[in-house]
Amino acid sequence: MTAAIHVDEFLPHPPAAVWHALTDPEALNAWFLPSDFKPVVGHRFQLQAEPIEATKFSGVIACEVLELRPEELLSYSWTDANNAGGLDSVVTWTLRPEGTGTRLFVEHSGFDLDDPQQKLAHTIMDGGWRSQVLRRLIQHLEAS
């Protein structure tokens, strides 16, 4: 059985500002994870995170931009670069204008809950997307 993490957050910033934070390489490195991201469909890039021994996560995330619709949607693959049997998933950011701000939806899909390591990764990342990633994005937007 596969599962996804879903996060829904209102940001009091216009879609253009949120889009910039998600797709500008310098901005992305400032608040998310170090990477060589470029907002181009087909571009392969890596994100550098902390390894997690319990899930056998190496800390190096291999990604490829799958879909890009300016100020609306960004989707990329998310795979452990050094663990061929590890998580093979997709992260999708969807932006919707709402009042003077943006409703941001994040979906991280592809977790195999029948695999104990991926089930643990799902649990860890579910909390991380909510308490760490979005918090850092909000702080970045407020400082910009």
Image (tube, grey):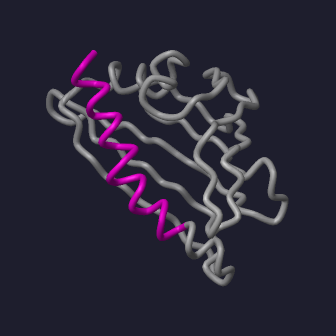
Nearer to me, 41 or 21 = 21
Outermost left residue: 99
Nearer to me, 73 or 79 = 79
- What residue is at 47 percent from the left and 34 percent from the top? 32
* Main secondary structure found in the magenta portion: helix
Compared with 52, 141 (above or below) is: above
Q: Position of residue 9 (x, y in %)?
A: 27, 47
- Image quarter hosting the C terminus: top left
Nearer to me, 113 or 32 = 32
Q: Quadrant of residue 76?
A: top right
Relative to residue 53, is residue 5 drawn left or right?
A: left
Magenta part of the chain: 122-144
Compared with 31, 20 (above or below) is: above
Compared with 123, 47 (above or below) is: above
Compared with 33, 128 (above or below) is: below
Relative to residue 133, is residue 70 drawn left or right?
A: right
- What residue is at 57 percent from the left and 60 percent from the top? 109
Q: Position of residue 56 (x, y in %)?
A: 70, 64
Q: Was residue 140 drawn as part of the magenta stretch in this picture?
A: yes
- What residue is at 35 percent from the left and 27 percent from the top? 18
- Image quarter hosting the N terminus: bottom right
Q: Was residue 24 drawn as part of the magenta stretch in this picture?
A: no
- What residue is at 22 percent from the left and 24 percent from the top? 142
Q: Position of residue 85 (x, y in %)?
A: 82, 65
Q: Quadrant of residue 60?
A: top right
